[in-house]
């Protein structure tokens, strides 16, 4: 049985309501902790042959912070007698003892709770349901209770895999003939379609029963489709509701996730339509007024599904595109003893963005070889020394198109050497964590830039913003910054490689993510002509997901 459906129904974003982990009760000094668990679970009916299929349940307190006391949790199973069997999970540390229709469990720690499994009882009727209630107590604290409704049978939606082209070109569009099957024991009273496309992919169609959200790294579409979707039937989107996926000009390595879930009973919208902000700049003939704000419409929530493991699919794409990483030249000036501030810079000229989806691997690393006589006083959290005169800085796993990378250093000119040369080099990491050029970066002449101290010639003026300023000698010869230090660095966009500079042999360095950029990496870039030639010769990628 194959049926066709349309997307024309009311919708909203899926929401999961969670309160703050810890609150102080208004009438008591004792902390209040909230028990969190699933609101509802569907169980497969007891099979004619074989064993019933277990479903995991859990009830845990949200972060208890510094509270070190022991908690007692009581699991009341009386309301599901004859419907479902609820026991402590054998896969978790045992904390509970049986006490009639109750389980009494004790636990302590930062997130105490109990892990359970539920199965349908033999002879339990289809659609039978009951609630498992859990309460908690602890000396010096209050615990709010929780409960999970268990029901027998339900829909089991399975999203069919789409035959998508994995290597589209920028601008290429593909149809999304989405189809799903209900392999459950009951109809679904409406479905929620969830689509998420990474930054380089576009979902161009717009429907009234869908909501759209644009983020820095991905775009999300959530549609609520009304209707009854029968068990043992297959459905597809009707021809009057086409959907397409388009590779943008900035696409490179992309993911597309598509899933289908049962919807809870629809709730009537109560919010008023907001005025279009497009005409906000035109004020003639209009007055600014205030009116009572309507409550927002409740977002559609997923209903229980017998097996959520097959509700969602993920497609990966490798788009034939390029991204151009460029290092920015840097100049510092000052007499011996001067402390200066300087920003090591690089940028992604695009057209593609770069993302290591599902990984913490940096999208790019920037190696900094200091000019002779210059020492680092303070380095950014994203940068680590790999040699006394060499630092490696790393981005996070995402660098968008046209994004500029900035690593602020505080430097001390210990010895004023004229025309002292260092280098700034940008590239990626290979599978072993070794620095190398990105295989999608076809412009090699700007991967390295000069880092110059006390040039004798006037530096070329840059049209880009400069981090320049006057420097004053510090009052101390120590490595710590003085209270009277000031900036003294300039940047330009001359992309020529440094003629000299110091470098060392391979040395590993590791670290943690901090702020916009995270610390990574092992090995080191060579500088000067050797590095430039090695970048030209090596063609394997380092920043692909």
Image: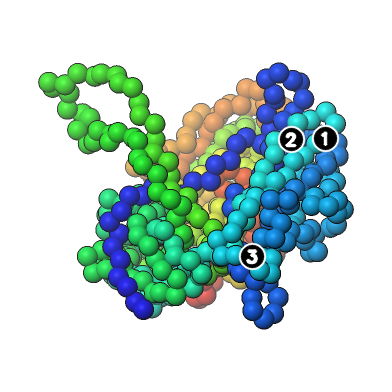
Could you tell me if the residues under marks 3 and 2 are in contact, i.e. CB atoms within 8 Å? no
Give coordinates of residue 402: x percent, y percent. Answer: 38, 51
Q: Earlier in the sequence, mark 3 or mark 2?
A: 3
- In this picture, is 280 found above or below 18? above
- In this picture, is 234 found above or below 37? below
Secondary structure type for disc 1:
strand
Screen quadrant of the N terminus: bottom left
Give coordinates of residue 99: x percent, y percent. Answer: 86, 51
Q: Which residue is mark 3?
A: 124
Identify the residue at image location x=71%, y=18%.
Answer: 27
Could you tell me if the residues under marks 1 and 2 are in contact, i.e. CB atoms within 8 Å? yes
Label annotation for residue 524? none
Residue 276 visible, this angle: yes
What is the crowding at mark 1: few (fewer than 14 residues within 10 Å), some, or many (at least 20)?
some
Q: Earlier in the sequence, mark 3 or mark 1?
A: 3
Identify the residue at image location x=27%, y=36%.
Answer: 273
Identify the residue at image location x=56%, y=65%.
Answer: 126
Q: Is residue 384 left or right of residue 275?
A: right
Seen from the viewer's position, the closer of residues 189 and 167 is 189
Seen from the viewer's position, the closer of residues 62 and 409 is 62
Q: Earlier in the sequence, mark 1 or mark 2?
A: 1
**Inter-mark Cα distance, 3 to 2:** 32 Å
Q: Which residue is mark 1?
A: 138
Label annotation for residue 143? 2
**Inter-mark Cα distance, 3 to 1:** 36 Å
What is the crowding at mark 2: few (fewer than 14 residues within 10 Å), some, or many (at least 20)?
some
User: Among all residues in the image, which is located at the extreme left?
Assistant: 285
Give coordinates of residue 366: x percent, y percent. Answer: 56, 55
């Amino acid at each position: 049985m194959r049926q066709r459906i349309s997307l024309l129904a009311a919708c909203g974003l899926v929401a999961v309501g969670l309160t703050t982990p810890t609150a102080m009760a208004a009438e008591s000094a004792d902390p209040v902790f909230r028990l969190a668990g699933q609101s509802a679970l569907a169980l497969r009916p007891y099979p004619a042959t074989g064993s019933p299929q277990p479903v995991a349940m859990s009830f845990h307190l949200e972060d208890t912070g510094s509270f070190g006391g022991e908690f007692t949790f009581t699991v009341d199973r009386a309301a599901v007698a004859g419907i479902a069997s609820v026991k402590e999970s054998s896969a978790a540390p045992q904390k509970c003892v049986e006490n009639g229709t109750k389980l009494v469990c004790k636990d302590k720690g930062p997130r105490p709770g109990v892990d359970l499994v539920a199965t349908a009882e033999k002879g339990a009727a289809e659609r039978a349901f009951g609630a498992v209630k859990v309460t908690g107590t602890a000396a010096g604290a209050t615990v709010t209770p929780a409960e999970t409704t268990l029901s027998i049978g339900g829909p089991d939606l399975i999203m069919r895999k789409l035959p998508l082209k994995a290597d589209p070109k920028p601008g290429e569009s593909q149809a999304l003939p989405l189809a799903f099957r209900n392999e459950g024991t009951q109809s679904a009273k409406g479905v929620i379609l969830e689509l998420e496309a990474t930054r380089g992919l576009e979902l161009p169609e717009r429907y009234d029963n869908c909501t759209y959200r644009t983020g820095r790294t991905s775009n999300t579409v959530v549609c609520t489709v009304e209707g009854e979707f029968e068990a043992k039937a297959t459905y597809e989107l009707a021809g009057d509701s086409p959907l397409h996926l388009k590779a943008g000009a900035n696409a490179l390595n992309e993911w597309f996730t598509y899933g289908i879930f049962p919807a809870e009973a629809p709730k009537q919208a109560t919010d008023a339509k907001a005025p279009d902000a497009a005409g906000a700049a035109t004020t003639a003939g209009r007055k600014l007024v205030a009116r009572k704000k309507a409550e927002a419409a409740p977002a559609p929530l997923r209903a229980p599904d017998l097996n959520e493991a097959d509700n969602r699919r993920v497609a990966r794409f490798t788009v034939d595109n390029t991204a151009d990483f460029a290092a920015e030249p840097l100049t510092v000036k000052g007499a011996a003893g001067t402390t200066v501030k300087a920003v090591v810079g690089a940028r992604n000229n695009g057209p593609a963005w770069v993302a290591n989806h599902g990984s913490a691997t940096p999208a790019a690393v920037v190696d900094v070889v200091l000019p002779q006589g210059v020492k680092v006083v303070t380095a950014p959290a994203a940068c680590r020394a790999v040699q006394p005169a060499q630092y490696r800085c790393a981005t996070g796993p995402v660098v968008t198109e046209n994004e500029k990378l900035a690593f602020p250093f505080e430097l001390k000119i210990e010895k004023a050497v004229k025309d002292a040369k260092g280098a700034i080099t940008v590239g990626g990491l290979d599978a072993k964590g070794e620095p190398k050029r990105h295989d999608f970066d076809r412009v090699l002449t700007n991967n390295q830039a000069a880092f110059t101290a006390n040039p004798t010639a006037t530096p070329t003026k840059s049209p880009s913003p400069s981090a320049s300023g006057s420097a004053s000698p510090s009052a101390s010869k120590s490595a710590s910054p003085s209270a009277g230090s000031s900036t003294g660095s300039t940047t330009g966009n001359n992309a020529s490689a440094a003629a000299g500079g110091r470098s060392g042999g391979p040395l590993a360095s590791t670290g943690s993510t901090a702020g916009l950029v995270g610390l990574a990496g092992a090995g080191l870039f060579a500088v000067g002509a050797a590095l430039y030639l090695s970048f030209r010769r090596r063609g394997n990628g380092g920043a692909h997901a």
